[in-house]
Image (cartoon, rainbow, N blue to C red):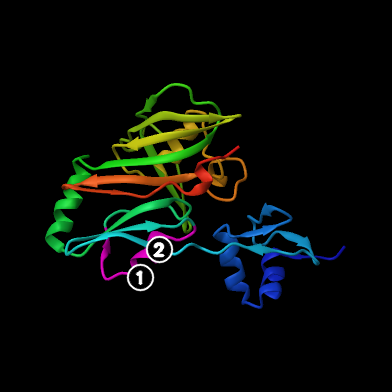
Amino acid sequence: MIKEKAYKLLAMQENISNRSAKDLIDRGLVFCKGRKVTVARGELDADSKFRVEKISKIKVVFEDKKIIAVDKPASLTSDEVEKKFDAKLLHRLDKGTSGVVLLVKDEDFQKKAIEEFKQKRVYKEYVAVVNGKVAEPFSIEDPIITIKKGNSFFSKISQHGKEAITHVEPLMIEGRKSKVKVVIETGRTHQIRAHLKSAGFVIVGDDLYGGKESKRLMLHAKKIELLGYSFQSPEPKEFSRFE
């Protein structure tokens, strides 16, 4: 059987450029025979057929003269969200993470909000589905160091890292997976992903940290509170049943 690179086959099927095809694969939107295609340059049978998922639309949760709260879908970067609004990002979510992202419209408010983050006075609540049975609440306070390789990042526990505090609470167990509530006091790159891995509970769909294959990274930013504001994003439907 003749083989060809996945992104080239996808480009031919969808009648798009090779670059666009590679981007779709890198976003985790392309499936073949029921499995997510994760390596754009990986070789597949020349007659392979693909299914391409669509990215959900960005929803505005709240807006006033100071702030915009939006519900970011998985597969979009925070920078891509920022480009759609006349406001500046206050914080970021990983591309694979869905949920509440805040943008600010007022410079004075931005300074106050940044100080709230620095002083750890911002409440940040997530929900995640992990491999393993989480039966009891626990906290992780191991410092994290982040390594940059090209355009990507990888974080790990290190005594030379920066302070990182994560609190985990079980919500539901189904089979060998658990849904957990995660509250973070700090905001290190990939903090939740790295901390949960260190505790033996890798997030489902987290290819970078050894998670089992899934349609998406099962991490959602559910709630954030600061300076008298409180914003929430409902859990995506895939978080209700995950076995």
Question: Quadrant of the image for the C terminus?
Answer: top right
**In the image, is 64 to the left or to the right of 205?**
left
For the residues labelled 2 and 1, the Cα–Cα distance comes to: 9 Å
Give the image location of residue 83, x and y in percent: 35, 70
Considering every residue shown, the one lying at the far left of the view is 108
**In the image, is 51 to the left or to the right of 151?**
right
Question: Which residue in the structure is indicated by mark 1?
Answer: 84
Considering every residue shown, the one lying at the far top of the view is 136
- Contact check, label 2 and label 1, Cβ < 8 Å: yes
Q: Judge whether residue 88 is colored magenta.
A: yes
* Residue at horizontal 37 percent and vertical 64 percent from the top: 81
* Residue at horizontal 57 percent and vertical 46 percent from the top: 207
Give the image location of residue 77, x and y in percent: 43, 60
Give the image location of residue 82, x and y in percent: 34, 65
Element at label 1 = loop
Q: Nearer the viewer, residue 169 or 238?
A: 238
**Crowdedness near tag 1: few (<14), some (14–19) or many (≥20) residues, C-alpha within 10 Å:** few
Question: Quadrant of the image for the N terminus?
Answer: bottom right
Q: Judge whether residue 41 is colored magenta.
A: no
Q: Nearer the viewer, mark 2 or mark 1?
A: 2
State whether residue 174 is above or below residue 78. above
Considering every residue shown, the one lying at the far right of the view is 1
Give the image location of residue 12, x and y in percent: 70, 75
**In the image, is 57 to the left or to the right of 102?**
right
State whether residue 142 is above or below residue 229. above
Question: Which residue in the structure is indicated by mark 2?
Answer: 58
On the question of residue 93 being in view, the answer is no
Q: Mark 1: which amino acid?
A: Lys
Q: What's drawn in magenta, residue-wise? A: 75-89
